[in-house]
Image (cartoon, grey):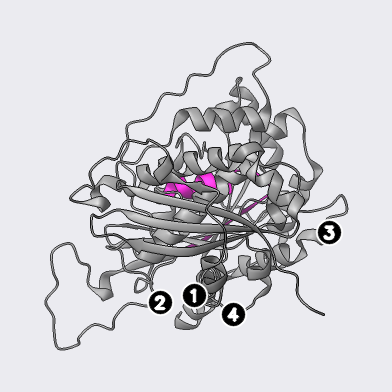
């Protein structure tokens, strides 16, 4: 098992490492190397500075972790994302989303490398702690067709935004780890990029590295969740989804259980249609259970979490369950800003822009100063991202800053800079 953990840990370090890797080259959320600090200092004034906008400054809570557990997703933003994905309701009705009253678990993503080895001579266990010999653990991979809702389901199960949730395809550009610890059980989630299958079941060339990473990692987990958008399947069946489900269902792995998850059931008006879809896939091999859920609304998520908890094996935990590290907060800040960029910038531009965290400081008053840079290959792409008189980057920054304040429950000074990449001499 230690060998298994050693294989998985490099995935979570890809976001912040300074060593070039294929995923780092594709990831738009790679952290800046220390050598970039000089160029950042010489850069022009920021294109967006949250200090120039009058946003209410709530006092920092005494217990940020406790406050984060009460986080709710903004239903208006979700409604807008749904409309962008599926268009307006042709029936003319207005879908009213009622927030379900439920507590959310703290996001445990990209935590420190390993637990401190316990003192063999010390048998005392503090309040709320679990002895190593009593700990249960499970590693879970989530895969599916593009925009099947993998990220939103991960966020719903883990309880915080650890992966970019947007209307664009392939918004998760690297494996992101989330950890849910309940009682004696710890579940580690790995959210993979969208597996783009062509009409002949072959990956598209422009995302080859992402796809190869996803396929190479699916057999590393104790359990695999294969999911698809059931609403889209009912409206416009996609042969790629069938190929993906069949391919994953046909691969035999005696050491791994697989379940089929039908997501976005809340968008299906006639619930009888869900039974038709379940019957359509009931004869596919390799899937032990079928689940119908709504990742955005949280419906059915408890059933999946309960099932996963029952599959856990007696094994020491891989992550510390009590802390939200600075690295987690940095990753969340990158993902939130990136999500807002994807919401406002169209075509292929978001995928060619390098997105870096340049500076992170906790100030004396408890607030955070976060500086991020967007580096565009061309001046024309920079102009599109900035917008007329800075309107577009202003909207991106304002929305991201408000969401970061809501997540961290403290004042956040967000600074965004858009610049053009320097030409390298041949």
Q: Is residue 179 above or below residue 35?
A: above
* Span colored in magenta: 139-158
Q: Earlier in the sequence, mark 1 or mark 4?
A: 1
Residue nearer the viewer, 341 or 39? 39
Q: CA distance from mark 1 to mark 4?
A: 15 Å
- Write down the quadrant of residue 421 in the picture: bottom right
**Labelled pair 4, 2 in contact (Cβ < 8 Å):** no
Which residue occupies 30% across, 69% down?
135
- Write down the quadrant of residue 360 in the picture: bottom left
Mark whose residue sits in front, 3 or 4:
4
Coordinates of residue 409 in the picture (x, y in percent): 30, 46
Mark whose residue sits in front, 3 or 1:
1
Horizontal side of residue 9 vs 65, given as left or right? right
Q: CA distance from mark 4 to mark 2?
A: 17 Å
Q: Is residue 338 above or below residue 424?
A: above
Residue underneath mark 4: 19
Q: CA distance from mark 3 to mark 4?
A: 30 Å
Residue underneath mark 1: 9
Q: CA distance from mark 3 to mark 2?
A: 35 Å
Residue underneath mark 3: 202
Which residue occupies 44% across, 54% down?
308
**Labelled pair 3, 2 in contact (Cβ < 8 Å):** no
């Amino acid at each position: 098992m230690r060998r298994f953990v050693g294989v998985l840990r490099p995935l979570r370090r890809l976001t912040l490492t300074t060593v070039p890797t294929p995923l780092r080259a594709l990831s738009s959320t790679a952290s800046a190397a220390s050598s970039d600090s000089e160029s950042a200092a010489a850069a022009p004034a920021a294109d967006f500075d949250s200090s120039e906008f009058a946003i209410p400054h709530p006092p920092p809570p005494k217990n940020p972790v406790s406050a984060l557990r009460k986080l709710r997703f903004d239903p208006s933003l979700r409604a807008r994302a749904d409309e962008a994905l599926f268009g307006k309701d042709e029936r003319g009705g207005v879908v009213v989303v009622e927030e379900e009253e439920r507590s959310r678990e703290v996001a445990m993503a990209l935590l420190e490398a390993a637990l401190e080895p316990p003192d063999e001579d010390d048998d005392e266990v503090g309040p709320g702690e679990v002895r190593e010999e009593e700990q249960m653990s499970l590693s879970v991979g989530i895969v599916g067709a593009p925009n099947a809702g993998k990220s939103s389901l991960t966020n719903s199960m883990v309880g915080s935004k650890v992966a970019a949730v947007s209307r664009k395809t392939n918004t998760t550009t690297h494996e992101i780890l989330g950890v849910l610890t309940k009682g004696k059980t710890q579940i580690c989630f790995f959210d993979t990029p969208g597996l783009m299958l062509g009409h002949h079941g072959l990956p598209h060339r422009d995302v080859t590295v992402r796809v190869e990473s996803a396929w190479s990692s699916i057999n590393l987990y104790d359990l695999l969740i294969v999911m698809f958008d059931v609403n889209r399947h009912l409206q416009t069946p996609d042969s790629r989804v069938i190929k993906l489900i069949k391919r994953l269902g046909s691969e035999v792995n005696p050491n791994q259980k697989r379940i089929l998850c039908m997501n976005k059931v809340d968008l299906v008006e006639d619930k009888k249609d869900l039974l038709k879809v379940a019957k359509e896939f009931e004869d596919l091999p390799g899937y032990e259970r079928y689940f119908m859920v709504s990742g955005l609304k949280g419906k059915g998520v408890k059933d999946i979490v309960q099932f996963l908890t029952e599959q856990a094996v007696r094994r020491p935990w891989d992550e510390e369950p009590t802390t939200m590290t600075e690295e987690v907060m940095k990753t969340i800040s990158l993902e939130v800003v990136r999500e807002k960029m994807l919401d406002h910038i169209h075509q292929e531009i978001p995928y060619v822009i390098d997105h870096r965290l340049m500076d992170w400081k906790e100030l004396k008053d408890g607030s955070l100063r976060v500086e991020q840079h967007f580096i565009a290959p061309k001046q024309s792409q920079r102009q599109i991202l900035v917008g007329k008189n800075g309107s577009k980057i202003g909207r991106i920054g304002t929305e991201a800053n408000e969401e970061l304040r809501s997540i961290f429950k403290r004042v956040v000074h967000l600074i965004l800079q858009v610049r053009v990449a320097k030409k390298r001499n041949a």
